[in-house]
Image: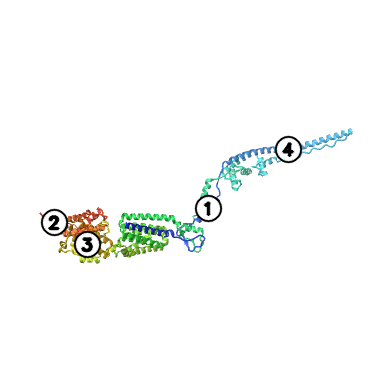
């Protein structure tokens, strides 16, 4: 429960640190501090091509105004021809009536003109007759003595005929012909019926053509184009000039407005005109606002559209921040489930859990602190490198991607960031395998630097595309920084290993190599004071290392555990058979219980020596677990034969059964090596060795010594094969094979 509580506290603290770093990082807080109607203190350039929304809106409004002012497109309304035709028919009938009246008036005038002399002669005769009658009446009155009559009045003399003009006055009542000149009016009434009919038929045909072909607006205005259209329509009739001119006048006067808006074309033209505006683009690198320039609303909107303005308050990013926090919680959940399923030792080992927490939080804090640096300088790669070296490469690979996503929101990353660190993190996780030797990690650093240099250029090719060669110098400089970061990361991680070993008790591969150095003080004591035990430990280490390597466990840890598992025998070295050199066995003179206590004491003393020499915790665990609760069968059987009431529990090791696969490998290797060594003089074939190995391992399995070691049945089988392969190579020269029966 204590471990679970501490792990929960570490997880919560890591999550809190992550959320705090994101909330105060560049993603939610990066930007310029500007207000409208204030003076800018800096020069700001566009980080990328962007649209000037205000300029685009101005262009759109201009296009809208232009579209609204477009000349409408009209089509011909053919129904108007019916009205025109009816009007022409009525006008023809009226003109025919006027022409008939003209003919009558003309005939009367001509008749009066022709009979004028006869009427004058008749008038003269009439006057003469009247004078003669008057003279007779005067004479008669004189004879009768009466008053003579007065002279009778003379009737007026006939005058020449005068044109009354009634026909032309009738034209004023006809709108169609009211504007005709007197000459044209005289011409239209004086032409023959045949010429009039031919002219009228021609003008009706021309009117139909023009009325149905030409777009005529209201009010009807005679234009050059319209006049030409009428003349062209009249040309097929082949009228004389006077009739063609008169017909043209009548046609033009008779036309009606026939223009109706063409909705389809007008709508299409309107939409095309509205959409025909230019989007204002601010190119990358263009100056948005200069130092000392007034910040207008338009400039403020451009900066806001580019996400270049810092948020005014936390509430501005509340919902995006909640979304990011939920995403981070999902990443944490996935990482925890991964560790639970595939790396249970981290949860069980408090030092490893604390180490992982420290590496993670330290990396997050460093990334937050260096968030404004160019991306090759971010210390993200320190985390996967140290986790791969100190804990596990597979764990580092999985957690690396989660860390990259978390840091993406801290530093406001982009596609370049994701591509570069995803590939580089995996590279560092894999190459950490080759940093276990001090002489090799320098070459590893150089190789990683070269790959980082090329990786930076490759990512630039991907993100910049065709613009990649516009600034070659900058690309090379960035790649050089990436290469420098690669080798610095290796040096920093390797240089900091002693700190992690000291404060968290972790064991690095390099530390393991130091522990296996024969010059190590504790190993030198074994070599000098207990040479048999030392030799036995070397063989156990070889067996355990091979088995651990074959089953996928930590081979280095198994080897180191094999070296030190019997270090406690330094207290009473001559009470252990491998150190007797063929002399008298001191256990022959001891009670079985006393012998048991002496043998058991080597585990407790081994733990004491491990503490004094500051051996890693996993070595102490192997020392404590390499016998588990095994029964010392020899002394137990000996005690049963010499005393009553002997309990088996008194002859079992009072320690812990193996908790790890490495510890189980050391236990099995220890038992197998001792058994095979004791039977060497009696071995006649390799089958006996294989059977002995299987018997020893199955005995441990049946005794429950491997129940908590996480070994599978398949692992046990592989361990048997590994032990046999090693022992066959070590002892084959000593095996006495049976001679062939020549008979």
First-in-chain label (3 vs 1): 1
How packed mark 2 is, by other alpha carbons closer than 10 Å (few <14, some 14-19, many 20 or more), is few
How packed mark 1 is, by other alpha carbons closer than 10 Å (few <14, some 14-19, many 20 or more), is many
Residue 462 position (above or below residue 123): below
Is residue 395 something one can see in this rendering? yes
Residue that badge 3 annotates: 601
Residue that badge 1 annotates: 63
The image quadrant that residue 339 belongs to is: bottom left
Q: Secondary structure at mark 1?
A: helix
From the top left corner, tell me how far across and down residue 195 is, in percent: 63, 39
Name the residue: 82% across, 35% down.
Answer: 130
Q: Viewer-nearest of labels 4 and 2?
A: 2
From the top left corner, tell me how far across and down residue 317 is, in percent: 44, 56
CA separation, marks 3 and 2?
Answer: 42 Å
First-in-chain label (2 vs 1): 1
Q: Viewer-nearest of labels 4 and 3?
A: 3
Point out the image quarter for the C terminus: bottom left
From the top left corner, tell me how far across and down residue 532 is, in percent: 19, 63
CA separation, marks 2 and 1?
Answer: 108 Å
Residue that badge 2 annotates: 738
Q: Viewer-nearest of labels 3 and 1?
A: 3
Q: Which mark is residue 112?
A: 4
Is residue 556 something one can see in this rendering? no
Q: Are marks 4 and 3 in contact (CB under 8 Å)?
A: no
Q: Which mark is residue 40?
A: none
Q: Secondary structure at mark 2?
A: loop
């Amino acid at each position: 429960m204590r471990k679970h509580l501490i792990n929960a506290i570490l997880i919560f603290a890591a999550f809190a640190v992550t959320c705090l770093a994101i909330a105060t990082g560049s993603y939610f807080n990066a930007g310029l501090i500007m207000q409208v109607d204030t003076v800018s203190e800096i020069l700001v350039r566009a980080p990328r091509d962007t649209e000037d929304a205000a300029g685009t809106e101005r262009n759109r409004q201009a296009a809208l105004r232009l579209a609204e002012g477009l000349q409408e497109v009209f089509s011909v309304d053919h129904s108007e021809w019916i009205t025109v035709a009816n009007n022409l028919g009525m006008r023809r009938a009226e003109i025919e009536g006027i022409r008939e009246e003209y003919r009558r008036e003309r005939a009367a005038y001509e008749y009066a003109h022709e009979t004028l002399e006869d009427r004058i002669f008749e008038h003269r005769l009439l006057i003469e007759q009247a004078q003669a009658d008057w003279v007779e009446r005067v004479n008669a009155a004189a004879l009768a003595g009466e008053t003579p009559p007065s002279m009778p009045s003379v009737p007026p003399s006939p005058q020449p005929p005068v044109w009354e003009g009634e026909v032309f006055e009738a034209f004023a009542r006809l709108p169609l012909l009211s504007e005709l000149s007197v000459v044209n009016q005289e011409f239209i009434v004086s032409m023959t019926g045949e010429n009039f009919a031919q002219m009228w038929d021609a003008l009706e045909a021309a009117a139909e053509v023009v009325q149905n072909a030409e777009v005529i607006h209201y009010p009807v205005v005679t234009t050059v184009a319209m006049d030409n259209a009428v003349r062209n329509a009249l040309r097929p009739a082949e009228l004389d000039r006077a009739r063609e001119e008169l017909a043209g006048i009548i046609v033009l006067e008779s036309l009606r407005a026939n223009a109706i808006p063409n909705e389809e074309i007008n709508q299409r033209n309107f939409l095309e005109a509205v959409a025909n505006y230019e989007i204002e683009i601010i190119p990358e690198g263009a100056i948005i606002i200069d130092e000392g320039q007034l910040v207008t609303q338009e400039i403020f909107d451009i900066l806001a559209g580019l996400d270049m303005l810092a948020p005014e308050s936390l509430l501005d990013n509340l919902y995006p921040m909640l979304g990011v926090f939920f995403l981070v919680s999902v990443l944490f959940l996935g990482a925890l489930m991964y560790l639970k399923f595939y790396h249970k030792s981290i949860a069980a080992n408090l030092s490893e859990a604390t180490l992982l927490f420290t590496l993670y939080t330290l990396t997050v804090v460093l990334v937050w602190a260096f968030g404004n640096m160019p991306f090759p300088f971010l210390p993200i790669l320190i985390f996967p490198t140290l986790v791969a070296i100190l804990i596990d490469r597979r764990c580092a690979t999985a957690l690396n991607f989660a860390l990259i996503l978390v840091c993406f929101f801290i530093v406001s990353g982009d596609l370049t960031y994701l591509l570069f660190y995803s590939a580089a993190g995996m590279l560092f996780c894999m190459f950490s395998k080759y940093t276990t030797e001090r002489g090799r990690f320098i070459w590893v650093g150089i190789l990683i630097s070269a790959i980082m240099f090329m990786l930076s250029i490759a990512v630039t090719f991907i993100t910049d595309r065709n613009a990649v060669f516009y600034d070659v110098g900058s690309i090379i400089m960035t790649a050089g920084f990436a290469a420098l970061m690669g080798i610095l990361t290796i040096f920093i991680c390797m240089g900091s290993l002693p700190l992690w070993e000291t404060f968290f008790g972790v064991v690095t591969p390099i530390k393991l190599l130091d522990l296996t150095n024969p010059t190590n003080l504790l190993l030198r004591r074994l070599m000098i004071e207990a040479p048999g035990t030392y030799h036995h430990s070397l063989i156990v280490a070889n067996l355990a290392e091979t088995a651990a390597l074959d089953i996928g466990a930590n081979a280095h840890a198994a080897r180191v555990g094999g070296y030190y598992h019997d270090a406690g025998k330094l207290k009473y070295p001559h009470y252990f058979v491998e150190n007797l050199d063929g002399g008298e066995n001191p256990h022959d003179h001891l009670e079985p219980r006393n012998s048991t206590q002496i043998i058991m004491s080597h585990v407790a003393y081994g733990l004491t020596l491990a503490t004094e020499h500051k051996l890693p915790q996993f070595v102490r665990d192997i020392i404590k677990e390499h016998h588990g609760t095994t029964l010392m069968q020899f002394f137990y059987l000996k005690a049963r034969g010499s005393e009553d009431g002997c309990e088996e529990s008194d002859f079992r090791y009072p320690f812990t059964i193996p908790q790890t696969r490495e510890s189980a490998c050391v236990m099995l290797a220890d038992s197998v090596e001792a058994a095979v060594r004791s039977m060497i003089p009696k071995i006649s074939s390799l089958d006996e060795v294989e059977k002995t190995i299987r018997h020893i391992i199955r005995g441990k399995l049946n005794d429950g010594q491997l129940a908590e070691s996480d070994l599978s049945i398949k692992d046990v089988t592989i361990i048997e094969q590994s032990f046999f392969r090693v022992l066959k190579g070590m002892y084959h020269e000593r095996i006495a094979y049976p001679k062939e029966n020549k008979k």
